[in-house]
Image (cartoon, rainbow, N blue to C red):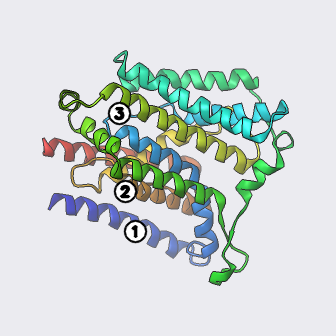
Amino acid sequence: MRHGLRQAGTLLGFAGIIAFFAWQLPDTFLTPRNLINISQQLSMLAVVAATMTIVMVMGDFDLSVGSMASLAGIVAAMLFVAGYPVWVGLGAALLVGFCGGVFNGVLVSVFGILPFVATLGTLTVFSGTAFLISDGRTIFGRDIPAGFSSFARGGVPLDGLGLEGVALPFLTLCAAAVIFACWFLLHKTVPGRRLYAIGGNREAARLSGINVTWLRILAFGLTGLGAATAGLMLAARVASANPTQGAGLMLDAIAAVFLGMTMTRQGEPRVLYTLVGVVMLGILDNGLTQMRVDSYVREILVGLIVITAVGVASYSKARRR
């Protein structure tokens, strides 16, 4: 009963946000072009939030994803400027992301450092590294290969569906692929079920023969990989890279996961519910932008959403125990 009320409350809030913006912006908000635009805007957040879900399934979290996204974009851009092929820049950035995530996992699972402390520390390390190797400057479009940035502007035409001049962005398709991969990992594979077991009771999972240490390291590695992927998508979309451009992803990703947790029976993270949280935040951002509301108001609203979602999820877990 309580689960139904929580889920209904979240969905009603979601519907209320859509109805409010549809009322305030009747000519622009629910148009196919704007909805496609929203999907592209939130594609980077969707990637980070989906991979963040993997870590939060175990009861951990990663505060460094925003700075890792920035670092990955800088790494790729610096290699592009140095004349390396696109695939080298992309591969190096993804490797940096995975290794950074593995480093977080080692700090947490091997050395026993609390995730908050460990990832807060690596947040500053990754951010400082991005500033160091870029000398604090923005790498602009003239230094970015045209093929890299044009990918983010391209898409699959939807003319056959009666949407003339509208295309489904490649970034949206990339995000969908990552979301599917995370869903498949967590719900259709043995390691995914073991991650949920670790989140339910870490000691019981260890005693049952699950290699908790290595699975936690792998989960953090995948989260770092997701952050790097989002950083590359963001750099391609704006055709530039700077040491701070991924800073806003961390809070929104955590907010999206916690919003999704309010919709589950036991208050546990699930990828598809995380996607609902991502869409809710994306719609809120798009609507407020169109209404020309100050960006600081959005930050206040996101903060309140995080507090509410965390409170509801924590209450659900307390009731379960």
Q: Residue at x 56, y 41 (%)?
A: 248
What's the amino acid at mark 2?
A: Tyr
User: Mark 2 and mark 3: span between their CA atoms?
Assistant: 18 Å
* Quarter residue 198 falls in: top left
Q: Give how far across and how far down residue 59 sits, in percent.
A: 31, 35
Residue topped by disc 1: 16
> Pointer 1: residues within 10 angstroms few (<14), some, or many (20+)?
few
* Residue contact between numbered discs 1 and 2, judged by CB atoms under 8 Å: no
User: Mark 3 and mark 1: span between their CA atoms?
Assistant: 31 Å
Q: Give how far across and how far down residue 253 sits, in percent.
A: 47, 45
238 w.r.t. 203: above or below: below
Please tell me the numbered disc located at residue 258: none
Residue topped by disc 2: 273
Mark 2 or 3, nearer chain start? 3
Residue topped by disc 3: 60
Q: Residue at x 44, y 65 (%)?
A: 17
Q: Depth check: 236 or 249 in front? A: 236
Q: Which element type, helix, strand or loop, lies under badge 3?
A: loop
* Residue contact between numbered discs 3 and 1, judged by CB atoms under 8 Å: no
209 w.r.t. 258: above or below: above
What's the amino acid at mark 3?
A: Asp
Q: Quadrant of the C terminus?
A: top left
